[in-house]
Image: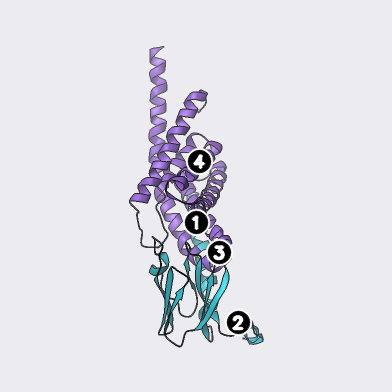
Chain colours: A cyan, B purple
């Protein structure tokens, strides 16, 4: 180890921390969170989090809305990263890379003028 | 290394490439799951780091690119090759630059390379998925890449030292014979 090594470790760790704060803090208060599903970058559907339901996405994935939380329950890929991901509720996303499925929480009025005013 | 013939260099390159592919295979068969989805130890990076330090940036790049191609052909897909290339490219770029400054130890260089590897893959994922949602994973992956990179760097540093000693030993042996 050299004297300057701490610079590298500090820069990387600081970058990760700042990114983490940037990504999580402002998303904390979404008024009326909804689940948006994207497949292959295209809109698949938007769902309210208030009613519990199971959604089948294409061939391989199944996600569940329960108690205002979303989680992926089934995926046909070998690594199952998305199934092991933490459930999302107020912000964040779950990604299934092999099937190009993205679950993300969006503001209920996204796109409307109220979303900007808020 | 100053006095190496072309044949020796080619043999060395082939040996390292084979090692890198085998390391990838070992990790594919025995995945070292570290608790976070998608995080791997990156065993073959030991070889890449050694190549960078023993042979230089270009041979290291050659080995990385060929390794990604071979691994994708054997156990992957064109998509996994794309991820691999982006990861390895970013990682090698960062490591080469940091190494050139000559201010950081091999462990720090490797740690930065590990983090850069994750950054490259997340950027590829964002492009392929046409979404920025994947960036939520980046903070965790950066830290994971930094730690696994440091670990790999530690092993590579030991190897590098041993290789240097062997090299020195051989040279003095040759001198004795003359």
Q: Which residue, given by chain and number where applicable, does mark 1 sit on?
A: B118
> Marks 4 and 1, how far apart in space?
20 Å
State the SS at label 2.
loop
Name, please, the residue furthest toward the left.
Answer: B30
> Marks 4 and 3, how far apart in space?
26 Å
Q: Are marks 1 and 2 in contact (CB under 8 Å)?
A: no
Q: Tell me which label, 3 or 1, sits earlier in the chain.
A: 1
Q: Is residue B90 visible?
A: yes
Tell me if mark 3 has few (under 14), some (14-19) or many (20+) residues whose alpha carbon lies within 10 angstroms of its own.
many
Q: Nearer the viewer, mark 4 or mark 1?
A: 4
* Residues behind callouts 1 and 2 on a single chain: no
Q: Which residue, given by chain and number where applicable, does mark 2 sit on?
A: A110
Q: Chain of mark 1?
A: B
Q: Tell me which label, 4 or 1, sits earlier in the chain.
A: 4
A103 vs B61: above or below: below
User: Residue B133 lies in what quarter of the image?
Assistant: bottom right
Q: Which residue, given by chain and number where applicable, does mark 4 sit on?
A: B66
State the SS at label 4.
helix
């Amino acid at each position: 180890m050299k004297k300057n090594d701490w610079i590298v470790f500090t820069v990387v760790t600081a970058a990760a921390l700042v990114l983490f704060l940037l990504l999580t803090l402002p998303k904390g208060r979404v008024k009326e969170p909804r689940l948006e599903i994207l497949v292959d970058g295209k809109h698949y559907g938007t769902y309210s989090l208030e009613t519990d339901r199971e959604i089948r996405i294409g061939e391989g994935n199944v996600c569940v809305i329960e108690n205002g939380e979303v989680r992926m329950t089934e995926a046909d890929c070998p690594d199952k990263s998305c199934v092991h991901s933490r459930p999302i509720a107020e912000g964040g996303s779950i990604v299934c890379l092999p099937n190009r499925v993205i679950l993300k929480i969006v503001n209920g009025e996204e796109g409307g003028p109220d979303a900007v005013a808020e | 290394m100053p006095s190496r013939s072309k044949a020796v260099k080619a043999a060395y390159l082939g040996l390292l490439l084979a090692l890198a592919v085998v390391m990838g295979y070992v990790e594919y068969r025995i995945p070292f799951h570290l608790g976070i989805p998608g995080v791997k130890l990156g065993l073959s990076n030991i070889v890449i780091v050694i190549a960078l330090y023993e042979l230089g940036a270009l041979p290291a790049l050659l080995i990385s690119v060929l390794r990604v191609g071979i691994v994708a052909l054997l156990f992957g897909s064109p998509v996994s090759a794309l991820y691999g290339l982006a990861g390895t490219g970013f990682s090698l770029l960062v490591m080469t630059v940091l190494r050139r400054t000559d201010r950081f130890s091999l462990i720090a260089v490797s740690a930065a390379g590990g983090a850069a590897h994750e950054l490259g893959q997340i950027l590829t994922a964002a492009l392929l998925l046409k979404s920025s949602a994947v960036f939520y994973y980046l903070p965790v992956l950066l830290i994971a890449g930094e730690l696994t990179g440091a670990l790999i760097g530690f092993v590579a540093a030991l190897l590098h030292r041993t290789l240097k000693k062997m090299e020195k030993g051989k040279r003095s042996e040759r001198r004795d014979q003359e």
